[in-house]
């Protein structure tokens, strides 16, 4: 299992995922005022994306999908 969570993205990929996480947090906060469950989904995905950025790990790459970033 530890090999599955081995870092597999570089600093550019981490930066992109961090930016996506920030955008998801902002969108989740804005949407939560109208549709709470959808806002929580956005924030949840943002938390997972932030985890990927901090860890330097990409779920898609860990599953064998080739990504550009």
Image: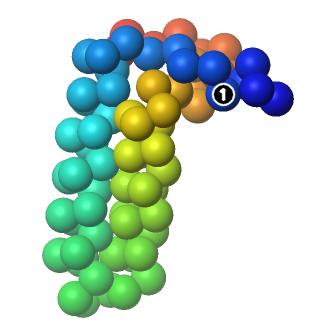
Q: Is residue 36 above or below residue 40?
A: below
Q: Residue at x 32, y 34 (%)?
A: 17
Q: Picture coordinates of residue 56 (x, y %)?
A: 45, 25
Residue indicated by mark 1: 5
Q: Position of residue 46 (x, y in %)?
A: 38, 55
Q: Could you tell me residue 24's position as x and y percent?
A: 28, 56
On the rendered image, what quadrant is the C terminus found in? top left
Can you tell which quarter of the image residue 13 is in? top left
| Position of residue 28 measured from the top left corner of the image (x, y, whole percent) | 28, 69
Query: For the view shown, which residue lies furthest in the right direction?
Result: 1
Label tally: 1
Residue 20: image quadrant is: top left
Q: Residues within 10 Å of mark 1 (few under 14, many from 20)?
A: some
Q: Residue at x 24, y 89 (%)?
A: 34
Assign a secondary structure to mark 1. loop
Residue 20 is left or right of residue 48, and the answer is left
Residue 40: quarter of image: bottom left
Q: Nearer the viewer, residue 5 or 64?
A: 5
Q: Is residue 40 left or right of residue 34?
A: right
Q: How is the image coloured?
A: rainbow
Q: Is residue 57 above or below residue 35?
A: above
For the point 48% across and 32% down, the residue is: 55
In the displayed structure, 37 sits above or below 23; it is below
Image quarter (top left, top right, bottom left or bottom right) of the N terminus: top right
């Amino acid at each position: 299992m530890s090999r599955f969570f081995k870092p597999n993205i570089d600093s550019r990929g981490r930066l992109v995922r961090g930016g996506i996480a920030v955008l998801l947090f902002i969108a989740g906060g804005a949407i939560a005022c109208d549709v709470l469950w959808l806002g929580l989904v956005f924030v949840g995905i943002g938390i997972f994306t932030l985890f990927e950025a901090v860890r330097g790990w990409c779920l898609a790459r860990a599953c064998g999908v080739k990504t550009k970033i």
